[in-house]
Image (tube, grey):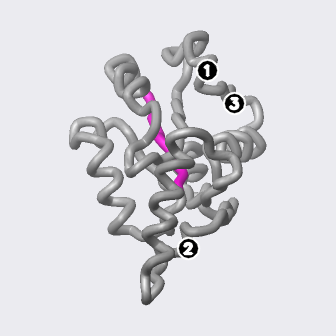
Amino acid sequence: MTAARGKATIKETTPGWDCLPFEERARAELSQYDRVVFGSSLRAGSIRKLSWLKKQLPGLSSKRVAVFFTGAMGPDEKAIAQCVEKNFTRAELSQVQPFYLWGGMNYGSMAGLDKWMMSVFRKMLASKKNPTQEDKLAASFDKADRKYLAPLEEYLTR
């Protein structure tokens, strides 16, 4: 599930909630909301644009804050925990609830550096004798499923 697709699905299931693209973040008055959700994607294990949200956290101390991030890795609890640990401090995790949404990989929509990095990675995978789960990254795929949103929706609606 791409971050944009996740946003669109959340908007469908939460009528009346405001959903803004990242490019329009300057007009967001986060203080007026009880819940703030930030959605992004992973790039080399880092949640893209997360630094912006982290700068907002001091003003969101009384809010329910969630971060959903999408990626190509499967829903492996250990890998997700490592990703969360890499992207958030313990103090941040006391204020933010992270959610991973398994998405996929679309080589056709990649540009520039991302496309080059993945082409190198794919060549490495192609040279393996015994393919593993990671070898599935050698081709575009889409594992987006609405079921991955359930924990996020539950968190936001309680």
- Does residue 137 show up? yes
Q: Which residue is mark 1?
A: 23
Q: On the image, which quarter does residue 106 sit in?
A: bottom right
Q: Nearer the viewer, mark 2 or mark 3?
A: 2
User: Which residue is located at x 66 percent, y 25 percent?
Assistant: 20
Q: Position of residue 76 (x, y in %)?
A: 42, 70
**Could you tell me which secondary element the residue under label 3 belongs to?**
loop
User: Which residue is located at x 75 percent, y 30 percent?
Assistant: 16
Left or right of residue 41: residue 104: right
Q: Position of residue 91 (x, y in %)?
A: 22, 37
Q: Is residue 38 above or below residue 57?
A: below
Which amino acid type is shown beneath numbered disc 1? Glu
Q: Which residue is mark 3?
A: 17
- Does residue 62 show up? no
Q: Residues within 10 Å of mark 1 (few under 14, many from 20)?
A: few
**Could you tell me which secondary element the residue under label 1 belongs to?**
helix
Left or right of residue 49: residue 15: right
User: Which residue is located at x 59 percent, y 25 percent?
Assistant: 22
**Could you tell me which secondary element the residue under label 2 belongs to?**
helix
Was residue 69 drawn as part of the magenta stretch in this picture? yes
Left or right of residue 82: residue 21: right
Highlighted range, magenta:
63-71
Q: Position of residue 107 (x, y in %)?
A: 64, 54
Q: Nearer the viewer, mark 2 or mark 1?
A: 2
Q: Nearer the viewer, residue 128 or 39?
A: 128
Per the model, the C-alpha gap separating discs 2 and 1 is: 32 Å
Q: Residues within 10 Å of mark 2 (few under 14, many from 20)?
A: some
The mark that comes first in sequence, 3 or 1, is 3
Q: Is residue 129 above or below residue 127?
A: below
